[in-house]
Image (cartoon, rainbow, N blue to C red):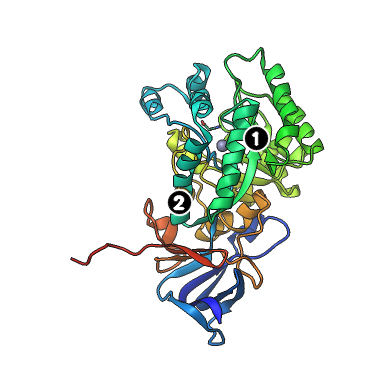
Amino acid sequence: MNDILIQNIGELILPKKTDRPLKGKKLNELTVIKNGTVAVKDGKVIYAGEHSEEYEAKEVIDASNKVVSPGLIDAHTHLVFGGSREHEMALKQQGVSYLDILKQGGGILSTVESTRKSTEEELYNKSKKEIVRMIQFGTTTVEAKSGYGLDKETELKQLNVAHQLDKDTPIRMKHTFLGPHAVPKDAKDNATFLQEMIDLLDDVKDKADFADIFCETGVFTTEESRRYMKAAKEKGLKVKIHADEIDPLGGLGLAIDEGAISADHLVASSEEDKAALKDSNTVAVLLPGTTFYLGKDQYADARGMIDQNGAIAIATDFNPGSCVTDNLQLVMSIAALKLKLTPNEIWNAVTVNASKAIDADAGTLEKGDQADVVVWDIPNHEYLPYHYGVNHAQTVIINGKKVYENTGLLTES
Ligand code: IZC
Ligand code: ZN
């Protein structure tokens, strides 16, 4: 008998399995099957498509008037950190900018202080709570960055915690070394510190899938970022970059040039760099929750990138400073409202294209795929970005096992 059978699915969402990220108009193509069936056995999808009576299972889920999709993929998070930065909210309300706070030794550097002080166990327990919440919100694969150590001991501590959580919790993870995330107050200069982080690549390369860098005014220049990316690739790591988040330094062009797997943020990217996405496999990972949380008016030009045949994904950027949410559903709504993405584009951006941005084997529900499946308590797939800020996940299945169910109130009275 099969393990789980999902029947009478109101709408079954089947993003297309592809070798390359979906680009341009293809992002708006999504197979949506009415009255679908999904059958899961031994952790794998054995059938997903039109209604079928061929399958039996110990557990049958009735998904009438509900939507079923692959689990969401959150391709950009700063999952493991100590402390919190709620005091920065008041500063931002008074008009102090994110980069000014960092310049004054706050921001990332204040999280670095808290993370250095935290024990591995403290970081583990704190991050585990976030993972539980992510799963509850329908995220089944997550990318987690280090970058709050800026020294060997703490960067390794963050990566070790993430690997332990990868083992201990059902969520699937990808791991990123973000040593060059800020320059510590006591560093001699940026170049010397960057070299320290380059020297660390040997120590972290077996614990990370990717190397990432914050290319921004007052942090690292494009030249420094290029040096780091070249060094990381020599160590066998794929590269990512925080590019053009606040100022237009040209990080996107650099990412495309260096064959980065993704370039993330891209709020201030140049027209020329955005147009160049079309001939590359670099995925533009857009983080509109961050623009929202920083209270800015200018969002990444998602429409321009798609219209020029680029590939985009969307992610939370969950972190303690510029986007304090692990709810990817909320970010899907912000993507609709502010990036003007269509529902089809949004679903592809958090499934197949997000998987390409982090080289994950996930995001589709074809025969033989890992059975990471979410049942959503919504009447159709367009409804999710529309009804915003709440949790629509009804049942979350990872690797063929039910790991979360919204069971409603404890009592009926
Ligand atoms: O802690 O502020 N942008 N890095 C680059 C961040 C935001 C995370 C933070
Ligand atoms: Zn980030």
Mark 1 — residue? Answer: 270
- Residues at marks 1 and 2, CA–CA distance in whole angstroms: 38 Å
Name the spot of residue 141 as percent of width and height, x first.
57, 54
Image location of residue 261, percent across then percent down: 70, 45
Rendered view: 76 above or below 412: above
Q: Residue at x 40, y 60 (%)?
A: 392
Q: Quadrant of the N terminus?
A: bottom right
Query: Is there any visible trace of residue 314 in the rendered image?
Result: no
Which of the 4 image quarters holds residue 181? top right
Establish if 19 lies above or below 150: below
Q: In the displayed structure, does residue 104 sit left or right of residue 366?
A: left
Q: Earlier in the sequence, mark 1 or mark 2?
A: 2
Q: Is mark 2 within 8 Å of ligand 1?
A: no
Q: Nearer the viewer, residue 355 or 170?
A: 170
Q: How many marks?
A: 2
Q: State left or right for residue 267 relative to residue 92.
A: right
Q: Residue furthest right?
A: 234
Q: Which residue is mark 2?
A: 132
Mark nearer the viewer, 1 or 2: 2
In this rendering, the answer to whether 214 lies above or below 1 is: above
Question: Dot 1 lies on which element?
Answer: loop
- On the rendered image, what quadrant is the C terminus found in? bottom left
Q: Secondary structure at mark 2?
A: helix
